Amino acid sequence: MKKRSFFIGLILLGGLTVACSGNTEKTESESTAIMEVADDPETIKANEQALKELKEQQRIEAESSTSMKIDKEIHDFGKVVDGVENHCTFTVTNTGDKPLVLSDVKASCGCTTPSKPEGPIAPGKSDKIEVGFKPSGKGVSEKTITITANTYPRITVVRVKADVQ
């Protein structure tokens, strides 16, 4: 009996990816997420149960999620002076029907310091993420700010950049 391997993995925020390969060899990266498609009733039942549990988890997450809109994906400071702190603001609007909670806001390096709103943002309301950016060195500098919230997807990334003189 020939079996085909299906790789099922959760993408960063709970999405589902299914990729199919015709061979039965497993790579190390597939070792924890392989489902065998076979004529074996036990395997079929286990696969169906795993998919049912995944769908239920996604449904629960979707019901407790809201949505948000950020006024811009990137803030370009243009030309800035080396070692001088620059400031910008990203406005976050709750476009869903449940309170928006920003659980974490992190920068990709220490030269960027974001601050998140302290409390939940009510539906239809907005708040601000303040960002300090103090690049060093010459040339174009670009950093990311990762926002984790009770949205789907859970993570949103915005960027700041500058041409450091």
Image (tube, grey):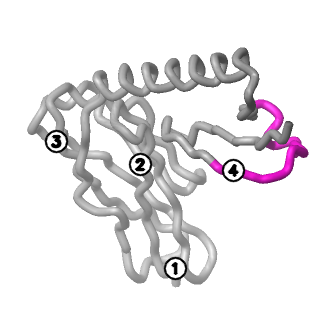
**Residue occupied by mark 4:** 20
The three-letter amino acid code for the residue at tag 1 is Val
Classify mark 4: residues with Cα within 10 Å, few (<14), some (14-19) or many (20+).
Answer: few
**Mark 1 or mark 2, which has the lower sequence index?**
2
At mark 2, the secondary structure is: strand
The image shows a total of numbered marks equal to 4
Question: Residue 146's x, y, as percent?
Answer: 47, 47
The relative height of residue 72 versus residue 164 in the rendered view (above or below) is above
**Mark 1 or mark 3, which has the lower sequence index?**
3
* Between marks 2 and 4 in the image, the one whose residue lies nearer the viewer: 4
Labels 2 and 4 touching (C-beta < 8 A): no
Classify mark 1: residues with Cα within 10 Å, few (<14), some (14-19) or many (20+).
Answer: many
**Mark 4 or mark 3, which has the lower sequence index?**
4
* Between marks 1 and 2 in the image, the one whose residue lies nearer the viewer: 2
Image mark for residue 164: 1
| Magenta highlight range | 19-33
The three-letter amino acid code for the residue at tag 4 is Cys
* Between marks 1 and 3 in the image, the one whose residue lies nearer the viewer: 3
Residue at the spot x=85%, y=51% of the render?
23
Labels 4 and 3 touching (C-beta < 8 A): no
Image mark for residue 156: 2
Marks 4/1: CA distance?
Answer: 47 Å
Q: Report which quarter residue 75 is drawn in.
A: bottom left
Marks 1/2: CA distance?
Answer: 26 Å
* Between marks 4 and 1 in the image, the one whose residue lies nearer the viewer: 4
Question: Residue 14's x, y, as percent?
Answer: 50, 35
Image mark for residue 95: 3
Residue at the spot x=80%, y=39% of the render?
3
Q: Report which quarter residue 55 is drawn in.
A: top left
Marks 4/3: CA distance?
Answer: 37 Å
